[in-house]
Amino acid sequence: MASQRMADEGLPVIARFEVHRRNYLKSDGSIARPVPAFASDANLLLSLYRAMVLLRHFDRKAVALQHTGRLGTYAVSLGQEAVSVGIASAMREEDVLLPSYRDNGALLWRGVKLEEILLFWGGDERGNQFSGPVHDFPFCVPVGSQAPHAAGVAYAFKLRREPRVAVCMFGDGATSKGDVYEAMNFAGVHKLPVVFVATNNQWAISVPLRLQTGSETLAQKAIAAGFTGEQVDGNDVVAMSAAAEAAVAAARDGKGPRFIEAVTYRLGDHTTSDDASRYRSADEVQMHWKEDPIGRLRTFFVDKRMWSKADEEQLAADCHERIEAATERYLAMAPRQPETMFDHLYADLPEAYAAQRHELAGEGDA
Amino acid sequence: MPEVTLVEAINLALGRAMEDDESVVVLGEDVGVDGGVFRATAGLQKRFGSERVLDTPLAELLISGLCVGMAAQGLRPVGEIQFMGFLYPCFDQLVNHASRMRNRTQGRLTCSMVLRTPHGAGIRAPEHHSESTEAMLAHIPGLRVVMPSSPERAYRLLLAAIRDPDPVVFLEPTRMYRAAKAEVEDNGEALPLDHAFVLREGRDVTLVSWGAMLKETIAAADELSAEGIDAEVIDLATLKPYDEATVVSSVQKTGRCVIVHEAARTGGFGAEIAAIIAERSLSSLLAPVTRVTGYDTVVPMARLEQHYIPSVARIVTAARKACQFS
């Protein structure tokens, strides 16, 4: 190896780096190491669990709506619910979330309504005018392109001396993009209050991680930008929440950016337009079902006698009711008037385009 | 009142905007200690500190993306891209984010930002430093594209751009940076955006141009005047959205129009103007609308660039032909 040869030559080592991995709940629901203090709060753990279960039920409904022509293309979170829920659970209202298109769990945790998410994926911009924090960003569809925004948001916080944190979420594929590295590099230079979260679900549509990077971990990509990267078991919501707490607190404290690689697995298709059986085997998917974040937390609860079959049934019924009611509200919402496509183009519609708006409104020729 | 160059007028406007509004932030490569490769930001870091006038890493995509994030948080960032040839990594941010943030969030998040960059050839710069690809930008809904052609308009339009609630790409005519000199009162007064300026009134032919080409266009109008042809000269100034009414009413008066731009002809912004004249004012035309433009080739390096930039003679010939058409 090159490093051995260099050592043989007596060349000094000038820097060493380590990447740690965080996990508390093993896939069978048993404890790998002492859980952090917050995990002794049964109500908090239960709320994380409920959020993950709601998301899973919601995804199922969204796919059904898509298959029956009542929703556009949709990206499910199946198998990776612990990532978005765990991350959001560590954020404060005044922090800013910059999500990618598969981070529904984080939006829901932050107060976005189910019908607003349906509205967005149903093809209506009003879905982004949501009930979550007014400063949160909408879903980012062009992969990784929101990372520089997160750095800009965090720069504004630092400039104004506000104890707030920007949290930017993207997938493993996004770490191949210059956007993400440029943003991390800048955040490192200025020690910005920003947390970058890479949801490593192993697949960027059909391209596996091994074709995405030669790195052993994604977490180590932070090292080149001058800050800490940590690998986390993304199917362990306790680990996700603890890692997010630590990273957000450090960022808020002026200790600079952090990077979290959440290792998980996309059990579903990339989107409703995808057929994952074209590029990966059923055996592979089946194997990863054993890692299911919801199943392992349920086992943990049941083992601790915190959760019964009746609780589970009640939760399923509650989710069903909420989702059905939200779906009704979504379906009842009429499309906007066509001419409103001009209404938020500029603060004031320039005279040059007023005629086109009139034409759409049927008020005359353009 | 002292005379200032166009680049000094830019500097005055930036200083004034930062003085008036503490949310204004200037960022880019070498804009801090160095004061910018053209000195547009000279002295600003000293006055306003390195937090508000920041040297970014060498990454253009980042500069434009930072602006979007800062703007969503209520800052008014003014990013500098050193040359238009280096603007292209910003296109993803301009097309997918800056220009549509307001629209895609239905007004919840907005993007009041300015991206400044030098525009055009003529200073014997290296390869990739002489671009004039404004038509690409003018095609993006939700964006404003502004290009001044004098120190006065540089100062007042830049102030307007910074105060505008929506994203503006501000293209600065490189070869006028130091060549153009005029008195400018640093009083913080802006000129309106989306507004064309009639620089010279005339009866016989309308010459429409923008940016550095106004220099040749005005010189052409002088020559034409010596021949007894009375040319009206319009500085379009804002290309997106542009002031159709001023162009159309001028052509209705003169009946003839020559459009002058440095950019390559095909798909250039002149085509848009010719189309609007055809749509709105065909019956007033006494001659075909013509374009005097850069050629449909790669803008050449220094040794040939003067052959690429439309000359006074080409403009005069086109205007003369329009007036002789029957």
Image (spheres, coloured by chain):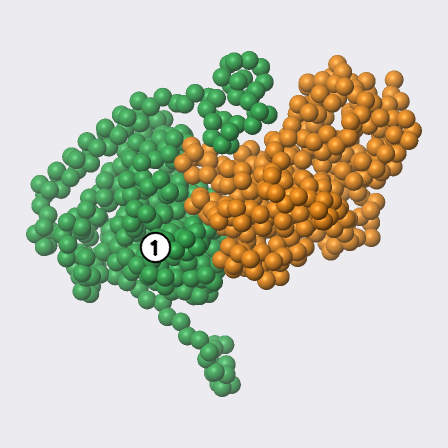
Chain colours: A green, B orange
- Quick check: A133 left or right of A301? right
- Quick check: A177 left or right of A129? right
Identified at 39% across, 62% down, the residue is A256
Identified at 9% across, 50% down, the residue is A306
**Which residue is at the front of the view, A173 or B51?**
B51
Identified at 36% across, 47% down, the residue is A97
Work out whether residue B29 can be spotted.
Answer: no
**Which residue is at the front of the view, A176 or A137?**
A137
The secondary structure type at the circle numbered 1 is loop
Query: Callout 1: few (<14), some (14-19), or many (20+) C-alpha neighbours within 10 Å?
Result: some
- Count of labels shown? 1
Work out whether residue A113 can be spotted.
Answer: yes
- Quick check: A205 left or right of B205? left
Image location of residue A321, percent across then percent down: 19, 31
Give residue B163's quadrant in the image.
Answer: top right
Kindly identify the amino acid type of the residue bearing the numbered disc 1.
Answer: Pro
Tell me if residue B143 comes above or below residue A164 in the rendering. Answer: above
Identified at 74% across, 44% down, the residue is B182
Image location of residue B169, percent across then percent down: 60, 42
Image location of residue B164, percent across then percent down: 54, 38
Q: Which chain does the numbered disc 1 sit on?
A: A
- Quick check: B25 left or right of B212? left
The residue wearing badge 1 is: A163
Which image quarter is the C terminus of chain A in?
top right
Tell me if residue A57 comes above or below residue A331 in the rendering. Answer: below
Tell me if residue A205 comes above or below residue A319 in the rendering. Answer: below
